[in-house]
Image (cartoon, rainbow, N blue to C red):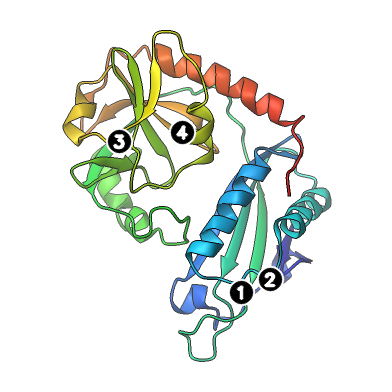
Amino acid sequence: MYISINNELLPEANANISVSDLSVQRGFGIFDFLKTINNHPVFLNDYLNRFFNSVKEMNMQAGFDKKQLSDAVFALIDKNNIPNSGIKIILTGGYSDDGYTMVKPNLIIIQTPLNIIENPTKPIKLVSYNHQRQLPQVKTIDYLQAIRLQGFVKENNADDLLYHNGLVRECPRANIFMVTDNEIITPKTEILKGITRSKVLTIEIEGYKIVEKDFELEDIYTTKEVFITSSTKNIWPVSEIDGKQIGNGENVIAKQLNDKLLQIIKADKKAEMVF
C-alpha cells in the first residue's frame, strides 16, 4: 500500500509527517473523500472543485492546481491498483515553527479498499443532537463532536447522529432528505453541500419536486420517508429518528432515487475532466 505525501509515493510504513504540523498542533486542515469503482474515481471533477473551495475558504495556499492534484490522484490509483477504494485528499496547515502560524501546507492522499454497496440493505437509525458545525460549508478535519458522541449514539441504539439547531442540518458524514406527499426536501443552509446530494437534486421523480428548504426537527418525525446521501452509502433509508419510526418502512421513493443515482454514477465513467 502506497500513500502520496507532497506528490511523492511512499510505502505506508514510511509515510509520515512531523508533529509540528498544524493538523497535529491545532487540528487545522481540510480534506475531501471520494470513491473509485473499477479504478475510476467517481465524480472526481466535483470533488476537486469542492476541495479547492475549502482551500479558498480557509485562506490556504495549496501550491498546486486542479490538474496537478488530479494527476496525483491517478498516480496513486495506478500504483496501488485497488479497483474499489476510498480516496482521502488531505491538506494540512504545514510545519509551523510556533505551532500556530499557517505555512506551506502538506498534501496527503490516502487510498484504502472499500466495499461498494450499490443497494442499501438494512435502514439505519439516527439520534438527534443539538449542534451546528463550525464553518459548515468547508470540509475540515474537525470531527470532534461526532467522535466524542460515539458513546451517546450507542446508548440510544442508533447508527449515527443527526445534527440540528432547531432546524435540521445534516449528519456528521452525510446529508439528509425527507419525503412528503409531493416534495423531496433537503436542508438548504448551514450545511456541507455533498456531491451525492447535488446529484440527487438533478433527478426527476414523477409526482415529486426535489427542493432545498430548511425544516424543523419535528417535521421529520411524521414524514413519509427519510434517507441520507453520501459518497460511500449513495442513498440509504432511515427507519428511526430518536426512537420514532419513520413512515411505513417501504422506502419506495428512496429506492427509485437510488436506481437513478446508480445510472448517473455509471454515466460518469464517460465524463471528461474540466480543468
For residue 240, above or below residue 24:
above
Q: Amino acid at mark 1?
A: Pro
Marks 2 and 4, how far apart at CA: 32 Å
- N-terminal-most mark, 4 or 1: 1
What numbered label is drawn on residue 63?
Answer: 2
Q: Amino acid at mark 2?
A: Gly
Foreground mark, 1 or 3, reads 1
Marks 1 and 2, how far apart at CA: 8 Å
The residue that appears at 75% across and 44% down in the rendered structure is 82
Q: Quadrant of residue 209?
A: top left
Q: Residues within 10 Å of mark 1 (few under 14, many from 20)?
A: many
Q: Residues within 10 Å of mark 3 (few under 14, many from 20)?
A: many
Question: Label 4's element?
Answer: strand
Q: Position of residue 18 (x, y in %)?
A: 60, 80
Marks 3 and 4, how far apart at CA: 14 Å
Q: Amino acid at mark 3?
A: Leu
Q: Amino acid at mark 4?
A: Thr
Foreground mark, 1 or 2, reads 2
